[in-house]
Image (cartoon, rainbow, N blue to C red):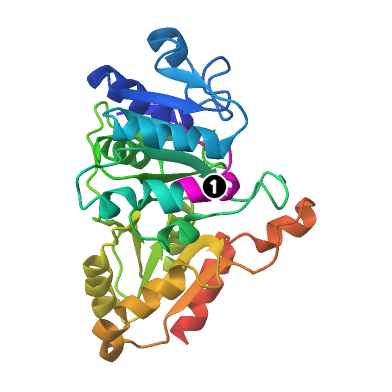
Amino acid sequence: MREILYRDAICEALDEEMERDDRVLLLGEDVAFIGGNFKTSVGLYDKYGDLRVKDTPISEAGFVGMGTGMALTGLRPVIELMFSDFMLVAADQIINNAAKITYMSGGQVTVPMVIRTPIGAGRSSAAQHSQSMQAFAAHFPGMKVVVPSNAQEAKGLLKTAIRDDNPVLFFEHKMEYSNKYMIDDVVLPIPFGKANIVRQGTDVTIVATSSQVMKSVKAAELLEKDGISAEVIDLRTIVPMDRETIIQSVKKTGRLLVVDEAYERCGIGAEIGADVMDDVFYYLEAPIARIGTPNVSLPFSPALEFPLIPTVEKTVEKVRKMMK
């Protein structure tokens, strides 16, 4: 085991995959000379050169479209969008082209492309740089959607994403980049569609994504002092979603809380609740609950921004209500 920053785990995954397969290349704004907006590609330009680590103009639609073309001709591009909010600038290329080409060609071609991009609030970056777009991405068919939690998960899941023959949206939480984690000396690819039970419990199931996994574990530790045993599940991938692990957990605990930082309305909590309801209804001891960001634009002011972000305290409070 060794200690590593979350952002360095991302960089290691890119490095190891580029070394393993010379078809893997990196595109995006400032990914080359300065090593990425959040320093997730430091050193890769010096090691692999301009043909495989390419700075692009500020034109998300242009370089996502270019990546799609590269994927169609046999390369395996990894594209970095500085903020997930900028997906909207390239939405036509992502949703109407990359995600649909395999279907519309009758399976004659594939698009082995990864789009990496940060999500989340907490840096006071205001309304156009703080959103969490994973629920938006999961709405459309043809793409896999990944929400890694800690450094080990980020490295293992990114390796899987790069080796996948489908377009993958890979959402990294920007508040995690500078956090340190212990990871294995050798991190193997983590299969998509298999959630991780990170804490066993018997009274309530908390399904969480991204940085909310670590917050949910802290909430579970606090709830334990109240005599409440919380099981915490790291969803890992929204598409495909491991509904069976969720169902089996809820049948054991009788309660389900979904915690995701995207907007609560039409979000991951609503999707999971509706999806598993038929299988768990007669096992429930309380209504299914969810925590997300309220449906308001995220403010620049920290005093206004921070109360909107899902926290450990909000999770603890919600579970206590569910236990009454």
Please indicate whether residue 263 sits to the left or right of residue 186 in the image: right
Q: Quadrant of the N terminus?
A: top left
The tally of labels here is: 1
**Farthest front residue in view:** 105
Q: Taking 93 as reference, is 23 above or below it?
A: above
Q: Residue 315: horizontal and vertical position, in percent? A: 52, 67
Q: Compared with residue 116, is residue 240 higher up or lower down, i.e. above or below?
A: below
Circle 1 SS class? helix
Kindly tell me whether residue 29 is visible in this rendering: yes
Which residue position holds label 1? 87
Name the residue rendered at 50%, 50% in the picture.
92
Estimate the x, y position of residue 35 in percent, counting from the top left. 53, 20
Give me the residue at 36% from left, 26% from top: 14
Indicate the position of residue 290 as horizontal and vertical percent values. Answer: 49, 73
What stretch of residues is rendered in magenta?
Answer: 79-93
Q: Position of residue 302 (x, y in %)?
A: 76, 51
Seen at 44% across and 53% down, the residue is 95
Residue 81 falls within the magenta-colored stretch: yes
Question: In this view of the protein, which residue sits in the foreground, 199 or 68?
Answer: 68
At x 57% / y 42%, what residue is drawn? Answer: 175
Visible residue check, residue 151: no
In terms of image quadrants, where is residue 73?
A: top left
User: Along the horizontal axis of the image, is 143 left or right of 252?
Assistant: right
| Residue type at the position of mark 1 | Met
Q: Nearer the viewer, residue 38 or 208?
A: 38
Q: Is 55 one of the magenta-colored residues?
A: no
Q: Residues within 10 Å of mark 1 (few under 14, many from 20)?
A: many
